[in-house]
Amino acid sequence: MKCFMCSASIPDGVSTCPECGARIVSGGANETKATEKSWKELVNSSKMNEDEKSYLGRAYGSLYNLSICKIVMAVLCTIVVGVMFYLVIDFSGAAKGLGFYRVFSTISEIIEVVISIIILIQYVRLSEFEERFGTVYRLFVAALLIGFITNFISNEAMVLVMKICKIVIEIIYVYHFYGAMADITCPFSESISDKWDLLFKIYVVEMIISLIMAVYGFIAIMGLNVSAYLVSLFIVTILKCIMIILEMIFLKKTVTVFENIEE
């Protein structure tokens, strides 16, 4: 078990953290429901001091902002899926559709960059509560930079290489992000913490399929098969949308846990 204040590992059965002295509600991993109930009882009965309440309040604010960003990204990604679906079924205008997609994609990516900056700020703030978020925001910046540079590369072979590099970095980034979310929620709800661990396994599958589609798209565009290239982009966009929606749902559950604790 980890201390909610300093994230230090603490042995079972202790009542206070040996590192920072914070009160520990439960020492057993099999007492999840009792732990959640005890945390709420502590706050409601004012047994948690103001510093501890304020600490949790700051974490709640960052997680809430993060969930709002994911909602906006989910809506944006859904719109992109709709546009891609239209382009895929309109095979007669595939070449023209590719040009339209690139313009539309550029606009959506600009919006994503703005949202990503807000997300980055939340990662920096959350690093105060869980040190793994420090690694998360560094990898997040690296993925953003690679994606930005890729937009200015015209050579399709180099674009494929950059996409592969970005996928590798994103897998490492998501490993730490989901792991940090699992760690920060574990003291309050092990069930939600386990869901973040499961989400990473789903993400790995999604990334493998995305990598296959990236290679397929490269082969298609080199063979001037614009329709097949659009299909590969469509599949990748759907997978991305599914992952964002799942993240949004789990973030909402996580925010609800912290909201209940803070109230």
Image (spheres, rainbow, N blue to C red):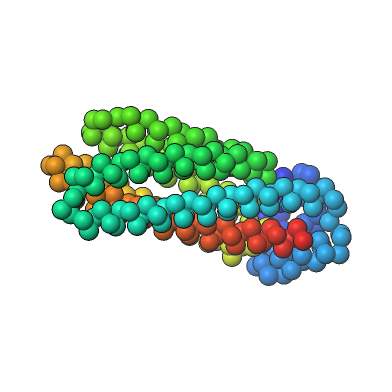
Q: Who is closer to the viewer here, 171 or 92?
A: 92
Residue 224 image offset from top left, x and y in percent: 14, 42
Q: Who is closer to the viewer here, 124 or 114?
A: 114
Quarter of the rendering occupied by the N terminus: bottom right
Residue 17 image offset from top left, x and y in percent: 77, 50
* Residue in the picture at 71% in, 66% down: 36
* Residue in the picture at 35% in, 57% down: 82
- Would you place residue 188 above or below residue 114 in this image? below
* Residue in the picture at 76% in, 44% down: 19
Would you say residue 8 is visible in this rendering? no
Q: Who is closer to the viewer here, 233 or 131?
A: 233
* Residue in the picture at 54% in, 38% down: 117
Quarter of the rendering occupied by the C terminus: bottom right
205 left or right of 186 in image? left
16 left or right of 185 in image? right
Q: Who is closer to the viewer here, 99 or 234?
A: 99
Q: In the picture, residue 29 is in which quadrant?
A: bottom right
Would you say residue 99 is visible in this rendering? yes
Residue 69 image offset from top left, x and y in percent: 55, 49
Pick out the residue farthest to the left: 223
131 left or right of 93 in image? right
Residue 26 image offset from top left, x and y in percent: 74, 62
Q: How many marks?
A: 0
